[in-house]
Amino acid sequence: MHEMSLMYEIIQLVSEDAKLRGFQKVKQIQMIVGDLSNVLPDALELAFLYFCKERACLLNEESQLTIIREKAISQCQNCLFQFEPDYRIALCPKCNLLDGLIISGETFQVEFYEGSD
């Protein structure tokens, strides 16, 4: 479960930035997680709850995590049709060619966080 180590790194980075800005705690973290990012949102949430309970860095049990899921969208380079692939490599449902370019769904990032004094 690599989501545990990913969440720990995110919490540490956000907490370091929050300290530089003079915050005493992190109230909320909002993230974008793409369907093709190889990260499971449910596992991220469990890891976040664990670190909140352990009061890791600037988190506490009132801290919240919001995950925005980004759908996977590919565009066929042959016919320009856009579709939702199941995997990184997928046949275009319109022309049946393996000529797709992933447009979205690979994102894994912190969108913003909110801290308090």
Image: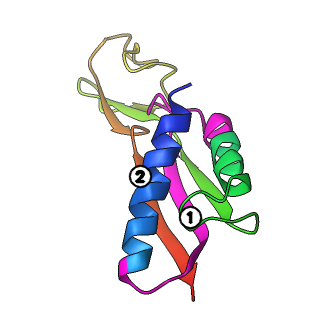
User: Would you say residue 6 sits in the magenta stretch?
Assistant: no
The percent position of residue 5, horizontal first and vertical second, equals 48, 37
User: Would you say residue 38 sits in the magenta stretch?
Assistant: yes
Colour basis: rainbow
| Three-letter residue code for mark 1 | Ile
The percent position of residue 76, horizontal first and vertical second, equals 31, 26
The percent position of residue 87, horizontal first and vertical second, equals 46, 18
In the image, what residue occupies the spot 30% across and 33% down?
80
Q: CA distance from mark 2 to mark 1?
A: 11 Å
Which residue bears the numbered disc 2? Answer: 109
Look at the picture and state if 56 lies above or below 115: above
Report the quarter where the C terminus lies. bottom right
The answer to whether residue 56 is left or right of residue 49 is: left
Report the quarter where the N terminus lies. top right
- Residue 25: image quadrant is bottom right
For the magenta stretch, what is the residue range?
Answer: 20-44
Look at the picture and state if 69 lies above or below 5: below
The percent position of residue 100, horizontal first and vertical second, equals 30, 23
Pick whichever of labels 2 and 1 is earlier in the sequence: 1
Q: Nearer the viewer, residue 81 or 112?
A: 112
Which residue bears the numbered disc 1? Answer: 29
Q: Secondary structure at mark 1?
A: strand
In the image, what residue occupies the spot 42% across and 77% down?
19
Q: Nearer the viewer, mark 2 or mark 1?
A: 1
